[in-house]
Image (spheres, rainbow, N blue to C red):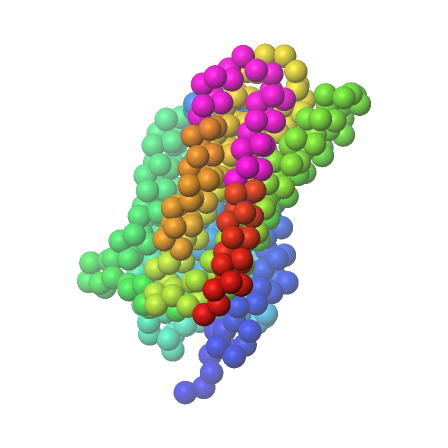
Amino acid sequence: MPRNPFLRQEGDHRSTVTPVELFFDLVYVFAITQLSHKLLEHFDVQGALQTALLLLAVWWAWVYTAWFTNWFEPDQRTVRLVLISGMVASLLMSTSIPEAFGDRGLLFAVAYVVLQVGRSLFIIWAARDNDVLRSNFVRLIAWSILAGVLWIAGGLVNGPAREALWVLAVLVDYAAPLFFFFVPGLGRSHTNDWDISGEHMAERAQLFVIIALGESILVTGATFSVLAISTEAIIAFIVAFLGSVAMWWIYFDRAAGDAAEAIAHSSDPGALARSAYTYIHLPMIAGIVVSAVGDELQIAHPLGHASAEVLITLLVGPGLFLAGHALFKYVVFNVVSIPRLVGVVVLVAIGVFGQGWPPLAIATAAMLVLVGVSAADVRTAHQREQRALHHPR
């Protein structure tokens, strides 16, 4: 059988992330910035829920594209055009985020549905000689169309009706992999059918974490650049930066590389990638976004009484990140991370006992929690290395 020119092959550096994938990710730098600004400008229960709903859609659009490029060759010209078309739809989504629950709701919904359904239509056509892959995406597109009807219907109405329909749409989207894309008459997919490169999927997720952390650093620099120079402003700037560094360290020091290797050698890499990357990375990304909002607030006003917004963002952000990473380590390595769980408990305690603290004190305490978890990881890694030296196999 002649080789399918669209599909990545085992000998074609399938684990390598290509420049066009990095180019595609640039749109999502803007999307993350838009989400953090929306949360900052609408910091109430409704605004937080709306931002969470939009983050779920943005992540789903990106992660499905990561799965797509795991199978399809991004440097093939037609696939590259599909990715560039996806960038256009993603950019329209991103520009619509501030008014997604206002005048631009329909544009957001249509762009999202066109991206999700259009990508699957291409796969069904391009993988016509690959029965397993084609059947998987025939099932997937059925779920995407069902969710798409809800997304577009929500874009056509206003107020609580839009929110309700979009919640249903997100539930359909996120339920699909959990139900193995079951469609009556077409059956269900199997995780063993999801033949992926674990290294590629891990690297794609790592790059999205870098995008989120980059947005956090961008916010830190942009906020500090317009302030009058003062001792407290400089300290607040350094604290925010060190918090981002600590999150980077926790994620990348050992776990990221080890996870890529674990998935590559898993007996069912599709199932592990679905859990570890498609779902579990989401709370980590959300935590980084919320932390960026907290950084902006505390750098702008480091002293005085901390508002509820400052307290919540400075503590919930790191808490979500640590909880998500603890779950990631458990799913991938079957390890319960005591430092991460202790860190979450300490953050809760700070929220209870630190309500009268100034923003800078709360930010410093949260940063020290993250640094403490990083230090515990370094110590654990050092102990393992010493055991390996003294007790080689």
Residue at image point 46% right, 45% down: 325
Residue at image point 63% right, 41% down: 245
**Front in this rendered view, residue 258 or 99:** 258
Residue 201, x across and y down, in percent? 48, 60
Residue at image point 25% right, 57% down: 182
- Placement of 303 over or under 234, stated as above or below: above
Q: Is residue 350 magenta?
A: yes
Q: Which stretch did the figure color magenta?
A: 348-374
- Placement of 190 over or under 363, stated as above or below: below
Q: Quadrant of the C terminus?
A: bottom left
Residue 165, x across and y down, in percent? 34, 36
Extreme residue toward the front, this view:
390
Regarding residue 138, the answer to whether it shows in the image is no
Regarding residue 211, the answer to whether it shows in the image is yes
Residue 64, x across and y down, in percent? 45, 55
**Front in this rendered view, residue 327 or 153:** 327
Q: Is residue 363 magenta?
A: yes
**Front in this rendered view, residue 310 or 143:** 310
Q: Quadrant of the N terminus?
A: bottom left
